[in-house]
Image (cartoon, rainbow, N blue to C red):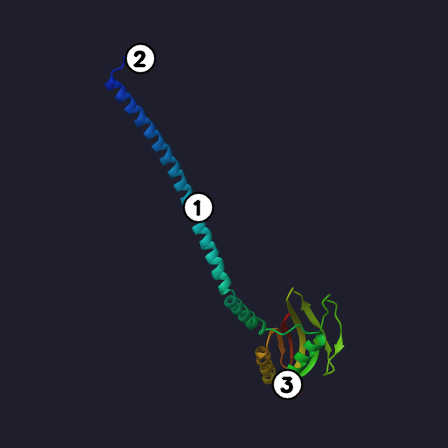
Amino acid sequence: MKKLIQELSQREKVLLYTLLCFLILVGGWFFVVTTTIDSYNSACMEYEEAVTKKADKDRTLQNYLLAPDALAVKKESYTKIVDKYNPILKNEKVDKLITTAILSQGLKPVSLEITTPDNSATNTTNTAGASAQTDIVSNESIKQVNVNVTLNGSFEKITKLISHLGSLKGVSVSNLQYTEGGSATGSNVSMTIIVYMIKK
């Protein structure tokens, strides 16, 4: 190798050294550029991750800032829903609610039936001297109480009672059976009055 180099002319030696320097320069430049490109790509990825995290944090912050308004809307909606129902009432209170509604329309309650939550019938005497029984269907927060009622009175008064019950909070009428009677005795009606209650 040494002998081969000695045999080269001065011009060839200069060209060889120039080529060697060029190769060193290009190799160094390529190494630097490759490292820089890798660093740039890594920095771009970190930037994109940072932008994504910032967007997530901005959304979280926005949700946090809007939380009081959202809570107020939900509370208002909940209050409107709850206000449509009665609070949880004991059998005596249900008895009083329905009996008062019936008497207010000038009708005479013949009987009401109240069933305890285990569906066993219990007979009680209400203020009008009638026995009472209520079928209670339990839910976690809502209870539906079915009050089976037998009434005696005129058709007009019974119609007014149905309208009055429909205007009460959390009360509706179902399963109505009407038997027309004479002018002296009045008509007989059997109906189920549903009372909806909710835990407040």
Q: Residues within 10 Å of mark 2 (few under 14, many from 20)?
A: few
Work out how far the residue at label 3 is from the one at label 2, CA to CA, in angstroms: 129 Å
Whichever of callouts 3 and 1 sits on the residue coming sooner in the sequence is 1
Q: Label 2: which residue?
A: 4
Q: Amino acid at mark 3?
A: Ser
Which one is in front, 41 or 57? Answer: 41
Which circle, 2 or 1, is nearer the viewer?
Answer: 2
Work out how far the residue at label 3 is from the one at label 1, CA to CA, in angstroms: 76 Å
Q: Is residue 71 above or below residue 149?
A: above
Residue 101 rendering spot, x and y as whole percentages: 64, 82
Query: Which residue is at 58% across, 83% downward?
Result: 160
Which one is in front, 77 or 133? Answer: 77
Q: Amino acid at mark 1?
A: Glu
Assign a secondary structure to mark 1: helix
Whichever of callouts 2 and 1 sits on the residue coming sooner in the sequence is 2
Quadrant assignment for the C terminus: bottom right
Q: Quadrant of residue 95?
A: bottom right
Which circle, 3 or 2, is nearer the viewer?
Answer: 2
Query: Which residue is at 39% across, 36% downward?
Result: 35
Which circle, 3 or 1, is nearer the viewer?
Answer: 1
Q: Is residue 3 above or below residue 142?
A: above
Assign a secondary structure to mark 2: helix
Which one is in front, 130 or 81? Answer: 81
Left or right: residue 106 versus residue 44 is right
Quadrant assignment for the N terminus: top left
Query: Which residue is at 40% across, 38% downward?
Result: 38
Q: Label 3: which residue?
A: 104
